[in-house]
Amino acid sequence: MDDKIRSVLTHKISVKKITFTVMDILLFLVLTGFALIMRYALRNVVAGDYKMFFEPWVATLREAGGGIKGLSAEFEYVDYTTPYLTILSFISICPFLNTLLLMKLVSIFFDFVAAFAVMAIVYDRTKNMTYGILGYGALLMVPTVLTNGAMWAQCDIIFTSFVLWSLYFMLKDKPAWSMAFYGIAFAFKLQTLFLAPLYVILWMKGKVKLKHFLFLPLMYVIGMIPSLLAGKSFWKLISVYFFQANGQMDIYALSHKFPNIYQLIGTDSFLFEYADAGIWVTLGALMILMYCFARKQYEMNACLLLRMGMLLTMTVVFFLPHMHERYAILVDVMAIVYVFFDFRKLYIPVLTILCSFAGYTVYLAQNNIIPMYVYTILFLLLMLDHARACVKGMQDGKIAVGE
């Protein structure tokens, strides 16, 4: 009897060249169950952002009629693009559940979209479904991912999930699909551009064509269609990201609970001077990294691509002023993927997520046991580790010019 049960559990099943066992199915179900239970436990948490921004926005959309019609509403202040406002507008007239729970359900849905992307990437590179399912579960258990949507009712996982699928198709050598998903991510959130330098490097390496970058404005314009149908002006919709980039709503602090360089030099000193200088320092640091990564001849493999992506994104959030605690979520999810390519680097996702989550605890729990500058130093050390690994990766993958 025991042997028969063990035989069933280890029985291999193949579906379209994907092989897995009954144990893999059970592991998937258990991890999914745990992820859902954890999110259910956070369902009633009401964060300040919801009361201050989201609840009034949804009320305004509802007053304007909700759905597509609701997008004609005029806001005193709103910094979200049409795709997410469309979701909120339909939530405003949904007869089921309340606004907070519906917003959280949308984010939770995209938690799973992102988790499936991680599973796809890990399985594609390792051909091991157990690793793929563990990657799926790890993404769902990451504290920053869990609290971002299920607790905070934020939507950062939406653009992050599309970026992950973009990386999946890039690793599959399908640049058009990759840039299409990257364009969808851009239509949802400006922070998608934190990873843009990586795609420029991939273009330099011949992995992407210039025409593929047209997916960014194309997807943004397609995303505007519901608001255009509701009567909003084209220019007003285009200018949303210009308003965000202006940073006027965030000017009161150089760092909004994120462990970046401003935690070392002061988050509320020389606000305008450091903010202006910080933008140029960020651009300068990115240009140096892009030059170093683009000029050498080497083979771009999956590990190196993820390391570069993490380093470039970390460089942006470390030097750019007015960064919020949520803005390193791209680094968190890429770190989860990376560790399944090299288990010796388990410290990377652990420390990366620890640094990111420090800001979450300050905002959500008003708790700061360890000074933020400690996390800043740790974050900087991780950046240096990524830089060293990128240099080594380029040397290991070095090819002769003209080869």
Image: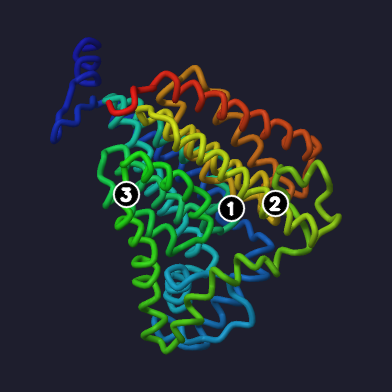
Please give the label number shown on residue 151.
Answer: 1
Residue at horizontal 39 percent and vertical 29 percent from the top: 297
Q: Secondary structure at mark 2?
A: helix
Q: Return the disc, 1 or 2, that comes first in the chain's sequence.
A: 1
Label 3 to label 1: alpha-carbon separation: 30 Å
Residue 163 percent coordinates (x, y): 41, 49
The amino acid type found where label 1 is placed reads Met
Residue at x 70%, y 56% (from the top left corner)? 322
In the image, is 43 to the left or to the right of 209? right
Asked whether, in this view, residue 52 is left or right of residue 5, the answer is: right
Establish if 47 lies above or below 69: above
Q: Which residue is mark 2?
A: 364
Q: Amino acid at mark 3?
A: Ser
Q: Nearer the viewer, residue 283 or 401?
A: 401
Quick check: 230 above or below 50? Answer: below
The residue type indicated by label 2 comes to: Leu
Helix, strand or loop under label 3: helix
Q: Which mark is residue 178?
A: 3
Mark 3 and mark 1 residues within 8 Å of each other at the beta carbon: no
Rendered position, 172 above or below 104: above
Instruction: Name, please, the residue furthest toward the top.
Output: 3
Q: Nearer the viewer, mark 3 or mark 1?
A: 3
Considering every residue shown, the one lying at the far front of the view is 402
Residue sitting at x 16%, y 27%: 13
Q: How is the image coloured?
A: rainbow
On the rendered structure, is 250 left or right of 155?
right
Residue contact between numbered discs 1 and 2, judged by CB atoms under 8 Å? yes
Mark 3 to mark 2 CA distance (whole Å): 34 Å
Which tag is nearer the camera, tag 3 or tag 2?
A: 3
**Which of the marked residues, 3 or 1, is nearer the chain's N terminus?**
1
Q: Secondary structure at mark 1?
A: helix
